[in-house]
Image: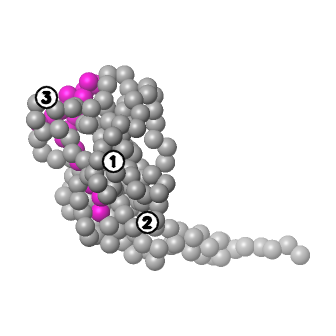
């Protein structure tokens, strides 16, 4: 006997699988979180946020916020000043983890942020910067302490999600 699945049953199965997925996404410069029940909550309202990433335990979201200020020379180009933030997926406890330099002479390798990704244990966030004319640098920020340290300065590094 051969089993046959009609289009309605297939659509129901796909919807059920998608409904259990928790996601973080950006819309109009704001960060949103959709829980396992399919409910979506707006987490930020700055209209300057992007690149959200959900922690492995689905309890936190990290994202990049572009802020006002003079552009920063990174060795590759001029970058808008940015910050990396973390917020609970329930919308509480937002705090800045990393900020671009704001004064002349500060280390400009911490500018041009991209691709924030939680470590597997959720205790730190890796991110890339435009630190040199021909390569990116990867940094790691400890979520608890905010301590930033270089993770790599290798040419052609890529954060894999």
For mark 3, give the secondary structure.
loop
The local crowd at label 1, few if under 14, some if 14 to 19, many if 20 or more residues have their Cα within 10 Å, is many
User: Is 106 in the magenta?
Assistant: no
Q: Which residues are magenta?
A: 70-87
C-alpha separation, residue under disc 2 versus residue under disc 1: 18 Å
Labels 2, 1: front one: 1
Q: Can you identify the residue that label 3 sits on?
A: 105
Q: Can you identify the residue that label 1 sits on?
A: 141
Q: Is residue 104 visible?
A: yes
The local crowd at label 3, few if under 14, some if 14 to 19, many if 20 or more residues have their Cα within 10 Å, is few
Query: Which comes before the other along the chain, label 1 or label 3?
Result: 3
Rendered-image quadrant of the N terminus: bottom right
C-alpha separation, residue under disc 3 versus residue under disc 2: 38 Å
For mark 1, give the secondary structure.
strand
Of the pair 31 and 126, the residue shown nearer to us? 126
Task: Name the quadrant containing residue 31.
Answer: bottom left
Of the pair 4 and 153, the residue shown nearer to us? 153
């Amino acid at each position: 006997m051969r089993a046959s699945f009609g289009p309605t049953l297939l659509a129901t199965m796909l919807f059920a699988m998608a409904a259990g997925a928790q996601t973080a996404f950006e819309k109009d410069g704001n960060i949103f979180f959709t829980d396992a029940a399919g409910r979506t909550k707006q987490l930020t309202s700055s209209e300057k946020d992007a690149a959200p990433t959900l922690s492995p335990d689905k309890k936190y979201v990290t994202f990049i916020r572009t802020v006002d200020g003079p552009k920063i020379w990174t060795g590759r180009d001029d970058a808008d000043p940015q910050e990396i933030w973390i917020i609970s997926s329930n919308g509480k406890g937002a705090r800045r983890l990393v900020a671009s330099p704001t004064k002349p002479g500060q280390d400009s390798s911490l500018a041009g942020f991209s691709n924030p990704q939680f470590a597997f244990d959720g205790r730190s966030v890796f991110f890339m910067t435009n630190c040199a004319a021909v390569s990116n640098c990867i940094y790691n920020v400890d979520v608890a302490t905010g301590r930033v340290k270089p993770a790599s300065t290798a040419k052609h590094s890529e954060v894999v999600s």
